[in-house]
Image (spheres, rainbow, N blue to C red):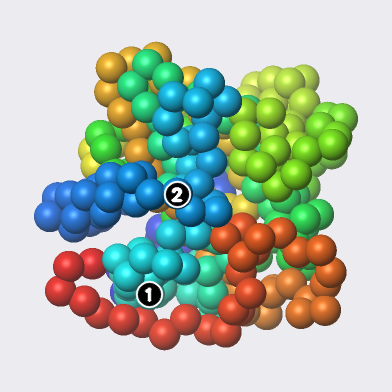
Amino acid sequence: MKYITQSQVNEFHANGFIKLLNFLPATEINALSDQVEFLEQSEYPGHILEEHGKGYRALHGCHLYDRVFEQLIKSPRFLYPAKALLDDEVYVHQLKINLKKPFHGELWPWHQDYIYWREKDGVPNDSIISVMIFLDDITEFNGPLFVIPKSHKMGSLDPKMPKQGGGWDQDVSAELTYQVDESVVESLIKQNGIVAATGPKGTVLWFHGNIVHASPSNISPFQRRVAIITYNSVANAPSKSRENLRPAFLCARDTSPLVEEITETI
């Protein structure tokens, strides 16, 4: 098994996440950061602003038009762990870069990811995982991800009344369509605690599609940027005949198995 140990696989299945410190060297993180800054200078369909309009909240689907991120998703350092965790060949269902600008980065409410992929994209089950790549040092001050250990074992929780009337952009805004009720969050934290995913840039966090998570707003003077690749089992791909799919930058059209690509920089 490459880039991940069996004990880490076991930890992932037990807790719903694993954190690998300094997984990527600074040279590669700097190259990714430079590319993010470049992409922020242009408008693409998957780029969405914060509600206050003072910067981008997220850049979706960069691997569909940018060579650097196309190479990133095929890196064996991510493909091998993804295959090990899902026990199958994988494709990328979604890629996004979440940005929290200094002083103005908005929060992400408590939620699970899989409910969006099930309800909006038709992904049959929760054999789907994400890897978050820290492009900046993430501390308790600049809006880290909060996760509730073992909450993935609860399956898909009934969300509080879904927000109505929004398009795909509501699924990625601070007013998320499906949110976990506060009373459920309180109960889960009493049972299993809460973890803030902090660490130096280059750290990666693998997390299950049904882990309950959130992140607070960033009111610090430090930016917080992360790239999130969502790998899905090929056997778990949405039906090709499903109608009204979300845009390709949220719901992949190509679900064929990814083949590793080794590059000098990523």
Q: Amino acid at mark 2?
A: Glu
* Mark linked to residue 231: none
Number of numbered discs overlaid on the protein picture: 2
Q: Amino acid at mark 1?
A: Lys
Q: Residues within 10 Å of mark 1 (few under 14, many from 20)?
A: many
Q: Residue at x 81, y 54 (%)?
A: 119
Give the residue number, with chain letter if any, for mark 2. 43
Q: Secondary structure at mark 2?
A: loop
Query: Depth check: 238 or 210 in front?
Result: 238
Q: Residue at x 76, y 64 (%)?
A: 245
**Residue 57: horizontal and vertical position, in percent?**
48, 35
Question: Is 20 left, or right, of 90 in this rendering?
Answer: left
Q: Residue at x 36, y 65 (%)?
A: 66
- Determine the image quadrant of residue 89: bottom right
Query: Depth check: 175 or 76 in front?
Result: 175
Q: Residue at x 47, y 68 (%)?
A: 64
- Determine the image quadrant of residue 100: top left
**Residue 69: horizontal and vertical position, in percent?**
35, 64
Give the residue number, with chain letter if any, for mark 1. 74
Quadrant containing the N terminus is bottom left
| Comparing labels 2 and 1, the label whose residue is closer to the camera | 2
